[in-house]
Image (cartoon, rainbow, N blue to C red):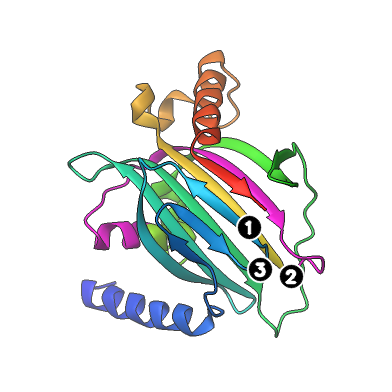
Amino acid sequence: MTTQFRLALCIILQFYIVQSAPAQDSRVEGHTFISPDNPKLQITIDEKFNYLGSLPFAIGNAAAGYRFIFVDAGADKRVQRMFVIQQEGFLPSSNDTYKYPIVDPVRLGTSEYRHSVSIVDDDEEVRQSPGAEAGLTRRFLESRGYKLNAALVMSRFARPSDPARKHEIILFCFEDLARYGHAIADFLENSQSAEKQRVKKVVDENCGKTFRITD
């Protein structure tokens, strides 16, 4: 695939995503994210993070939404931490709903969120699905001069955000694994080493200090 073809494909993909995404009603004022519905809430983010903007995305012909992206980066614009608010919903043409149960629940504001902490290879995510959220986010960051390392620790919170379960909200805290002196190869996928658990615990604790929900 030539560079010109990749560029044309990205332009077509971005046009499709913008056309598919629902109207963006949520907004960011200063360091506060404000959503009027699905769900109605406010999220206050640590002032160390800079808001870069919102990114539309689509999941096939079924769902679409926006990612609101905040980063904490060094002078070289290499991202050390990133906080992402993702609002997503099934399109009117889809009869599907968000059916997942709330396992390992964490209460944020007045609601319970499904919670997990994992170590991810962002490069592999982009290779497998270049048009999905990870690839779009990588290009969004690069278009603003930021660099994101591949090895990340991710704390994730998710819940359906309306009674019909047609919408959901997901919150992500990402940290560069290199901050802890490790690479992906240090932790096998199914490894439960004490060091891996320590790193995940610290990142999750840091995440809890990054934002506050009011709903």
Which dot marks residue 166? Answer: 2
Q: Which residue is mark 1?
A: 41
Q: Could you tell me which secondary element the residue under label 1 belongs to?
A: strand
> Label 1 vs label 2: CA separation?
17 Å
Task: Return the disc, 1 or 2, that comes first in the chain's sequence.
Answer: 1
In magenta segment, residue 160: yes
Task: Return the disc, 3 or 2, that comes first in the chain's sequence.
Answer: 3
Question: How many neighbours does mark 2 have within 10 angstroms: few (below 14), some (14-19), or many (20 or more)?
Answer: many
Percent position of residue 152, x then y: 43, 38
Q: Residue furthest top?
A: 194
Q: Which residue is at the front of the view, 10 or 190?
A: 10
Q: Amino acid at mark 3?
A: Asp
Percent position of residue 153, x then y: 47, 35
Which dot marks residue 37? Answer: 3
Q: Residue at x 60, y 54 (%)?
A: 170
Residue segment shown in magenta: 138-166
